[in-house]
Amino acid sequence: MRERRTVRGAVSALLLSCSLALAGVGVLAASTPTPASAGSTPSALLPDVIMQPITEIRIQKGIGVKMLRFASIIGNSGAGVVELKPDSAARSAENDCDGDGDPLNDRKAFQRIFGDTDGDEMFTRGADEVLRKRFAGCSVFHAEHDHWHFEEFARYRLVKPKTGRVVASSEKVSFCVRDSIHFDPGLPGSPGAIYYGNCTQDSITGLSVGWADYYGSTLPGQELDIRGLPDGRYCLRTTADPADRLRESNQTNNDRSTLVRIIGRDVTDLGTTC
């Protein structure tokens, strides 16, 4: 009788050991990235365009000049990159992207969206492949900056806080979209070095994961004309991708605002959103 119980106990222990081993294998399998199988479509690694806090707020003074100037920083906090590839088609009238009659000063820009080819849920340069491309807008030559810009990448407005009435605006602000500031190096897939550099006519531009493009207050386009504006409090609002030209994972964080007080030729950032 005692021998039968001993055998039964040994069998139970063996079964328990096998169950634990199989469970361990299951955990290991679940934690190992699974590449997309042949014929299947990998999930899209979308960027997340965000507008960073507004900085360098000041008033430009001069004879007949009163400009509210500020810096903008547009970043990418998504799982994938912002990548804009210029059209390689021959220059012709039908490729006049901005419709100004000159097909040589602009190009169609296509957003390239990458798929999670290797299944690790983050962008890996060289491993993840282009999933699709979509028309995103125009790239035009910016004479003042002497390089190419992606059109309508930002919009700036100054509004009355209580009524929301727009008192000054700057529409269709274009950017040479590139890596300038490594604002979040801890994001999965964020490279340690700049990948998207200068905006030449044929270069692929964009924002790497965890990187941002900085446009200082001295640059053309980083201003609002406030001549004749009464003293008081106003809400300065900046918006990234205002026309929703880019496919991204989150559209709710493209705006940034700050309350400012303007008195004569002086401006104070009051440090609160509005």
Image (spheres, grey):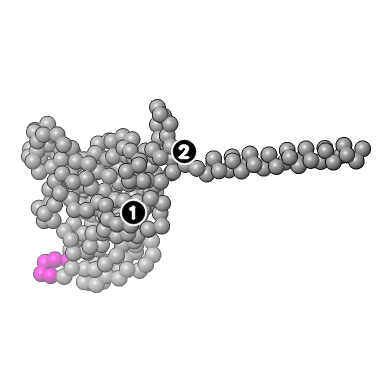
Which amino acid type is shown beneath numbered disc 1? Pro
Query: Which of the two discs, 1 and 2, sits closer to the camera?
Result: 2
Residue 253 visible in this rendered orientation of the protein: no
Q: Residue 219 or 269: which is nearer the viewer? A: 219
Q: Which region of the structure is painted magenta?
A: 62-66
Tell me the chief SS of the magenta region: strand
**Residue at (40, 29) in percent of width and height:** 38
Residue with the most extreme front position: 3
**Residue at (73, 38) in percent of width and height:** 15
Residue count near mark 2 (Cα–Cα under 10 Å), binned few <14, some 14–19, many ≥20: some
| Magenta stretch contains residue 63 | yes
Image height check: is 43 above or below 234? above
**Residue at (31, 66) in percent of width and height:** 260
Report which residue position mark 1 lands on.
191
| Magenta stretch contains residue 50 | no
Q: Residue 84 or 24: which is nearer the viewer? A: 24
- Quarter holding the N terminus is top right
Image height check: is 149 above or below 270? above
| Residue 26 place in picture, x, y as percent | 59, 40
Residue with the most extreme right position: 1
Report which residue position mark 2 lands on.
34
